[in-house]
Image (cartoon, rainbow, N blue to C red):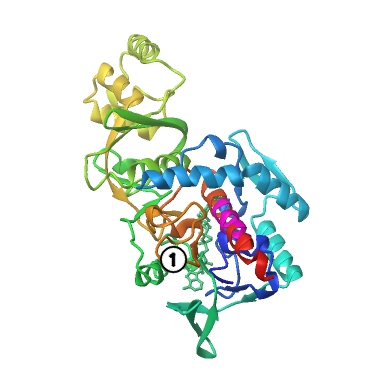
């Protein structure tokens, strides 16, 4: 069995393969799990207790359905139980985000690395797969290594090579071509879990300001998505936890329709309360300049930007504090994104994530057209899909071991 990619899905797949001695992981980087070790700002938001209730995104209905069925097979508690066996304890925060108890993402990489070593899986580093050819009874893989190019034969191949996001971790999108050459279709690709570009006319003076606990809403046709969290103003638009969490709902829509974000700076106060406070303030402090009226209510610079946009009118300023709208113009792109939206079409894989076009070819993780929300959902997809593939391969090889 050849596993292409020693990231989250490749390592989990190798962990569950019974015929470990005949399994080889090819990783183009000089270490396995480089990205895994950087997740959750280095703290490793390794899964989420809400995965079973979450809908994953896919451009195919089949993809959404398959993602759900893979999660049912191996969910956050199955993952936690597996890690416990490896001596890694997990702790959960108030948003269901699960971290290694020592708050180091590398704990997971280390545990998997040690486990594969113990199982006798052959992990080959700095080995990039540049071609996969279907040959009689299996596949011929071309490997590019510091020692030169060579070919290997494998009966089964799993493409666990990730997507196009964050190319500094070895995922530059080149692995899609391996699947495309074998006849598979790639959907459109978009960056997800990424900073958002907006029109900047009204936020030019706000660069670097962070608003804690803002409510950000995006309207998408007849529905809307609302998230509460931190928003950071930047020179290109918006960053921060709330923006990352909204991004999976919008990055694929920006090109085809006009998308607008709206920020409520003070969700705990009603428009009426703000209106009354400001009217009273004007009576108590009649000489205060309109530009300064919002001091003590929002960050001073935000107050000035709001009053400028409201032309000094209190009613308009109140509306802007509750709904500061900004047209979305794009995202910061794949290099800054954590995840790829889109991938190898889910209509071309079976229930066990085996290619419907070529027997013995499997896919797991981000390379497929499935992505999740921010908060541990993407890593869980990588593990769940890998677990499903491992089960299929174990069943297939049972008679042969
Ligand atoms: C900075 C950052 C933080 C993140 N934080 C979180 C988080 O906290 N929680 C969460 O759920 N998700 C997070 N993610 C997303 C998550 O890490 C990915 O969705 C997940 O790692 C995907 O797993 P994968 O196995 O499909 O791909 P990857 O983990 O990307 O692994 C793919 C591997 O394949 C190798 N490879 C590629 N092409 C080849 C080739 N031709 N030959 C050999 N090897 C190859 C790559 O070098 C790489 O090691 C984060 C992502 C980033 C970039």
Q: In what element is the residue under mark 1? A: helix
Instruction: Give percent across and percent down for residue 36.
Output: 58, 59
Residue shown at 55%/61% (left/top)?
A: 35
User: From this viewpoint, is residue 376 visible?
Assistant: no
Query: Which quadrant of the rendered structure holds the N terminus?
Result: bottom right
Q: Quadrant of residue 13?
A: bottom right
Majority secondary structure in the magenta region:
helix
User: Looking at the image, can residue 112 be seen?
Assistant: yes
Q: Position of residue 176 (x, y in %)?
A: 39, 66
Along the viewing direction, whichever of 93 and 113 lies nearer the viewer: 113
Please tell me which residue lies in front, 191 or 239.
191
Boundaries of the magenta span:
384-391
| Residue 118 lies in quadrant | bottom right
Compared to residue 115, the image places residue 202 above or below, namely above
Q: Residue furthest front?
A: 399
Q: Nearer the viewer, residue 178 or 205?
A: 178
**Disc 1 target residue:** 167
């Amino acid at each position: 069995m050849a596993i292409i990619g020693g990231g989250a899905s490749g390592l989990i797949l190798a962990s569950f393969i019974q015929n470990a001695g005949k399994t080889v992981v090819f990783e183009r980087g000089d270490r396995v799990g480089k990205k895994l070790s950087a997740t959750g700002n280095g703290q490793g938001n390794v899964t989420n207790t809400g995965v079973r209730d979450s809908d994953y995104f896919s451009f195919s209905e089949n993809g959404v359905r398959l993602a759900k069925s893979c999660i049912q097979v191996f969910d956050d508690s199955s993952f936690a139980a597996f890690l416990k066996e490896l001596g890694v304890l997990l702790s959960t925060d108030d948003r269901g985000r699960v971290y290694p108890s020592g708050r180091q993402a590398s704990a997971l990489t280390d545990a998997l690395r040690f486990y594969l070593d113990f199982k006798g899986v052959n992990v080959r580093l700095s080995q990039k797969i540049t071609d996969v050819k279907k040959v009689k009874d299996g596949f011929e893989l071309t490997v590019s290594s510091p020692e030169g190019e060579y070919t290997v034969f494998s009966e089964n191949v799993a493409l666990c090579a990730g997507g196009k996001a964050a190319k500094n971790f070895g995922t530059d999108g080149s692995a899609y071509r391996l699947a495309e050459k074998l006849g598979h279709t790639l959907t459109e690709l978009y960056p997800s879990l990424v900073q958002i570009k907006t029109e900047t006319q009204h936020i030019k003076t706000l660069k670097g300001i962070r608003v804690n606990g803002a409510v950000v809403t995006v309207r998408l046709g007849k529905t809307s998505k609302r998230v509460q969290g931190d928003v950071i103003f930047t020179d290109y638009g918006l960053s921060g936890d709330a923006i990352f969490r909204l991004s999976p709902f919008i990055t694929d829509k920006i090109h085809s329709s006009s998308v607008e974000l709206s920020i409520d700076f003070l969700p705990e106060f009603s428009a009426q309360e703000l209106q009354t406070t400001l009217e009273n303030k004007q009576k108590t402090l009649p000489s205060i300049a309109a530009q300064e009226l919002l001091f003590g209510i929002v960050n001073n610079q935000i107050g000035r930007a709001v009053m400028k946009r409201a032309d000094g009118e209190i009613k308009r300023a109140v509306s802007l504090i509750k709904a500061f709208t900004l047209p979305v113009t794009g995202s910061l792109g794949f290099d800054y994104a954590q995840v790829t939206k889109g991938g190898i079409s889910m209509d071309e894989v079976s229930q066990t994530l085996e290619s419907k076009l070529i027997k013995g070819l499997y896919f797991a993780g981000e390379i497929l057209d499935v992505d999740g929300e921010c908060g541990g959902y993407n890593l869980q997809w990588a593990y769940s899909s890998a677990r499903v593939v491992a089960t299929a391969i174990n069943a297939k090889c049972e008679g042969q071991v």
